[in-house]
Amino acid sequence: MVYAIVRAGGRQEKVAVGDVLTVDRVQAGAGETVNLAPVLLVDGETVTSTAADLAKVTVTAEVIEDLRGEKIVIQKFKNKTGYKKRQGHRQELTKLKVTGIK
């Protein structure tokens, strides 16, 4: 089985053809194709990790949709001072489908 470790959205993800993954927001519209930077490639028994060989490899993915993550609540409190602060955050995400590893 061919799979690759790619750098996507600030993290490294293990992907194979047909996988759907959620990464930080990518500046591309739905239906567009993006290239992901490979860090490691495993092709059956062969492992490719040198920069010269990885420059020849392309990992392509199709943008399925843009979405937002779950809301997280940030609360700060300091005792005896009357200081309370509450804040929420929703991370902007993109869902990608890997279409090819060549």
Image: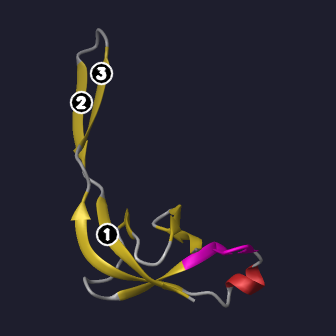
Give the amino acid type for the residue marked by disc 1 in the picture: Thr
Q: Quadrant of residue 28?
A: bottom left
Q: Residue at x 67, y 91 (%)?
A: 56
Q: Nearer the viewer, mark 3 or mark 1?
A: 1
**Disc 3 marks which residue?**
77
Amino acid identity at mark 2: Lys
Residue at image location 57% in from the left, 73% down from the top: 3
Q: Nearer the viewer, residue 43 or 64?
A: 43
Name of the residue lying farthest toward the top: 80
Quadrant assignment, res 26: bottom left
Residue labelled with disc 1? 94
Prevalent SS, magenta region? strand
Would residue 48 be visible to someone looking at this image? no
> Is residue 42 shown in magenta?
yes
Q: Is residue 79 visible?
A: yes
Verify CB contact (< 8 Å) between mark 3 and mark 2.
yes
Residue 25 within the segment the image draws in magenta: no
Whichever of labels 3 and 1 marks the residue nearer the N terminus, that label is 3
Q: Check the image and report above or below for 91 versus 57.
A: above
Give the distance between the C-alpha atoms of the residues marked 3 and 2, in whole angstroms. Answer: 7 Å
Mark 1, mark 2: which one is toward the viewer? 1
Q: Amino acid at mark 3?
A: Phe
Q: Secondary structure at mark 2?
A: strand
Q: Rate crowding at label 1 as few (under 14), some (14 to 19) or many (20 or more) other CA atoms within 10 Å.
A: many
Would you say 78 lies left or right of 57 here? left
Gap between marks 1 and 2, in whole Å?
30 Å
Stretch of the chain drawn in magenta? 37-47
